[in-house]
Structures are given as C-alpha cells and as structure tokens.
Amino acid sequence: MDIEIENLSKRYGTQKAVDNISFKVRTGEILGFLGPNGAGKSTTMKMITGYLAIGDGNIKIGGDAVSDAGDGIRRHIGYLPENNPLYLDMPVMDYLAFCAALQGVADDKIPVRVREMIRVTGLNKEKHKKIGELSKGYRQRVGLAQAMIHDPEILILDEPTTGLDPNQIVEIRKLIREIGKEKTVILSTHILPEVEATCDRILIINKGKIVADGTSETLRKQASGSEIIKVRIEDGSHGDIQFALRQLAGASQVDLLDAAMNRFEVQSQPGASLRRDIFKMCTEKGWVLTEMTALETRLEDIFRNLTMN
C-alpha cells in the first residue's frame, strides 16, 4: 500500500513545523526518515497515521486521501510512537490481546496473533510479566508487537530501537527488513548506521523542508564532488612523497597522516580521479605503493552538512 505526500504543511502558531513537503513511499520499500530534533519528522508521521490533523496539503494511502477516508484508514497502519505509551499495569499478553481487539482483529484470531507477535519480537520469556516490570528494551519490543498485531500494510516506526542493546538492535533490524519486503515502512531514527543497515532509501528533513532524498549511495555521490584516497608509499621520505603528490595535476589537498608509515590522504579536484596518476608516479620514482584506498563520504558528514544551517 503506497503512501503519497502532496504539499504537506503544519503550523504551530507562527512556527511552520512542516513546510510544503512532497514524497512517495511504495509498497516493499523501507524509508529512513532523518532529521535533527524539531525538524518535523514526528509531526509528519503523526499526520500520516491520523493522530494529528493535516494542516495544508494532502496525504494519500493506497490512493485514498486520509482526510476523506476517516478512521477506517488506521486499520491499515501500525504505529510505534517515539515515547511508546504503554499500560504498565497490564501483563504483556493481555495488553497485546487488548490492542488486537482495538484494531478489529477477529476474536478467534487474537490468540494466534498474540503468540505470533510474542515469537517474532522475542518476548517469550517475558510474556507473563506486567509491562511495568520489563526493561526499557523489552518495553520497546512490546511497542513493536502492538504496532504489528493487526498485520497492517503500513508500518510507521518512530525511533524503534531506542533502549535496545546491540544484540536486540540487530534482531529488530532483521525483523524490519523481513517486514519491509511486503509492507510499506517509514522508519525514523537518530542512529545513522541503522539507516544504512535497514533502509532502502533515505529522506532528510530540516526545519520542516526536505533537503535530501535518495539511497545512501546516491546521497554520497551528490555530496562528494571530489575523490579522497588514503595511500601508503614505501622507500621514499615522507617529505619527498608529499611534495610529489602535491605536484599531481588533479590534486587539491595532500595531508600527512603518519610520518613513520608514510601514509597520506589525497583529495582530488572536483571530477578528477588520481588513482592512475599515483600508481604511475610511484612506478617512475621506484617507490612501492602498499596501500591505496578510496574513502567514501560518511553519512554522518552528509547529514551534518545538510542540517547545520
């Protein structure tokens, strides 16, 4: 079930939390929704789920406008909000059964769905405990289970791995990847490696506006106009090597990383590639090239560049 956002805006008093954004998420796609605090991520997600009224613009789910579809559209959506509100006095299984009933799951199918969610979210050892007795990580699993209890076609997950330990994060990433093969998933997170490990596409929002949209590879290519190479060259002195590297026609910057190891970082001019030139230079001077590694622009750097202003 596709999600289509058209010229969506939301204002709180004089502040525009979401400013005329448009994008589409297709079935079978996991969209990583990134942005600094206050960028408009949670506001956008709440409007998609119907928990917050749309300001201006339109949201279509499965081709139907949310504003016209009413509450019925929520049955197609599973939502894990950032603060994960739970009934702490309820046992895990009772809470999930309660959520299933609220979502319109047939009475005879509720026990099956509860057992399935207990299994896929790894809650079996904790299923008879009250939610208030659980650790933060297990409470987050309960939140994920309630979002999926009615087998929705769309999942909106706001910081789904908050409070999980590294092993749990890997498990939840795997679960989201499996779910994303058949469902439409929007995943908000501050953990950038998680986005690359889980999401098919990345959308970055800043001050209510979309500032980037594409795969991590596409964003790197757009952000990096020059090639950065790490090299290690033996036999020559580091002074002679650095001087020779700086004389290469396409070089814009050469930094010495380790004098003892003769390791350098070489940045090319926009559009230029230096790998052939470095290899040729070493051959002509009789130096041994023992390392030449192209460095990718980090997603963290792209994020900072797009959201610092």
Image (spheres, rainbow, N blue to C red):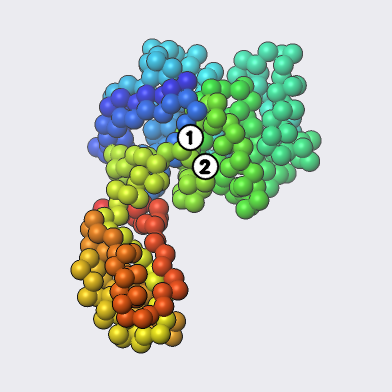
| Residue 16, placed above or below residue 58 | below
Quick check: can you spot residue 293? yes
Which of these two is toward me, 243 or 6? 243
Q: Residue at x 50, y 13 (%)?
A: 72
Q: Residue at x 55, y 41 (%)?
A: 160
How many labels were placed on the picture?
2
Left or right: 24 in relation to 127: left
The image position of residue 97, as x and y in percent, is 70, 24
Disc 2 to disc 1, C-alpha distance:
7 Å
Residue contact between numbered discs 2 and 1, judged by CB atoms under 8 Å: yes
Left or right: 46 in relation to 175: left
| Residue 189, placed above or below residue 233 | above
Q: Residue 31 is drawn in which quadrant?
A: top left
Q: Residue at x 34, y 30 (%)?
A: 23
The disc placed on residue 198 is 2
The image position of residue 67, as x and y in percent, is 37, 16
Q: Residue 258 is drawn in which quadrant?
A: bottom left
The secondary element bearing badge 2 is classed as: helix
Residue denoted by label 1: 30
The image position of residue 1, as x and y in percent, is 47, 20
